[in-house]
Image: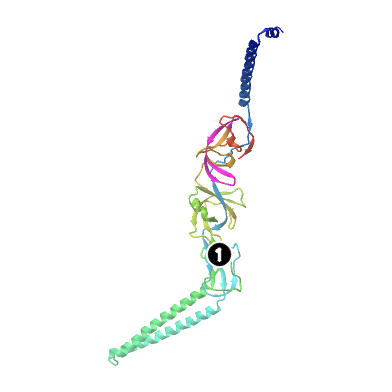
Amino acid sequence: MKLLHWLTKLPKKQLYYVLAAATGLCITVGIILNENNRTKVTAEDVVTVRTATISATDGPRGYTYAGEVRGRYESQLAFQVNGRIIKRNVELGTKVHTGDVLMQIDAKDIQQTVNSSSAQVASAESQLKLAESNLNRYRQLLDQGAISQSQYDQYANAYHVAVAGVQQASSQYAQSANQLDYSLLRADKPGVVSNITAETGQVVSAGQTVVTVVQYGEREVEISVPENRIEELRNAGKIKATFWALPTVTVDGKIREIAPMADPMTRTFKVRISLINPPPEIKLGMTAAIQVADRYTQPTVNIPLTAVYQDGNTPAVWVVKDNVITLQPITTGKFGNGTIEVLSGLQQGDCIVTAGVHRLTEGQKVKSGGDVL
């Protein structure tokens, strides 16, 4: 009240200056208080962001191919003569030894050929004996001067022709005898019968495969590889084989051969993987999975493209640590379906921001929560 009474007694001009000074002071104090409050709110503002935790898998990258267990050596056996099969002594899976008769064809016609060749040999030998007797007789006459030299030469020539005739007949007999032996299909190596393509009563031609025998010994897995991964396969750092029927068995492998040309139907390359010290439980025809790992051993992970902060030529991500974000440069690799591969710059357990990365600033406090990559 005293202040108000004092103000009423002041001249109007002085009263105007006092009120103006008081108003300016109030405005100044209000601005200062407002700035302090704004700074306090900004400093304490916490943004909620979507994050994900890196969970990279240690070890090399690679691919998996489906394959089939095969033998290292497979003999596709066929008859060397034409004929009708009259006997089959093996079934699929039969274990055979060297020399075992697998199949037999009708050898009646071949036997007749052998008989004819044998008769020709006998005839040639008789002709040779006659030529030899004549030669000896005419040699004596030549020595006595009863015949001329030209007559003796004729008989000598006949003898040589008879000798050649015996050799020819003997060769034909040996050939026909071989043909008779070829009517029996024998195993050339010990192994197991894996395929039979002819039955009893079927007429087969020479060279037509009728039985496949897988020899004992090495086991392999045959896979088909697309052409864009052949070089990666050549430079593979580690190859392992697993088996659908033996889930607890894992066998090391190595590349034995790669087909020089692609299959005309599938446009893939046949590759043979040799199994190193396979256990006896692995059987022919089993389904196998070949895991091919390249030599790149650094852990990698795929992150969403929305997590990449691009400012210039170096990509980066926001890493959250103690609820504070920092910008971490990264090295990127291949693109995926809405993702990108990170080759370096992140470690297992790092928490990164996956959305709204261009609205954040260095050192900003955030509230995180998200998934695991």
Residue 207 lies, with reference to residue 355, above or below; the image says: below
Residue name at image x 54 percent, y 48 percent: 62
Q: Quadrant of residue 89?
A: bottom right
Residue name at image x 42 percent, y 80 percent: 168
Q: What quarter of the picture does the N terminus occupy? A: top right
Judge whether residue 60 can be spotted in this image. no
Which residue matches tag 1?
212
Residue name at image x 59 percent, y 45 percent: 338
x%, y% of residue 269?
52, 58
Comparing 16 with 52, the one in front is 16
| Majority SS type along the magenta span | strand
x%, y% of residue 35?
61, 22
The segment highlighted magenta reads: 320-342
x%, y% of residue 71?
54, 58
Q: Is residue 124 on the magenta stretch? A: no
- Badge 1: residue crowd in 10 Å (few <14, some 14–19, many ≥20): many
Residue 48 lies, with reference to residue 334, above or below; the image says: above
Q: Is residue 327 on the magenta stretch? A: yes
Type of amino acid at the residue the image marks with label 1:
Thr
Secondary structure at badge 1 equals strand
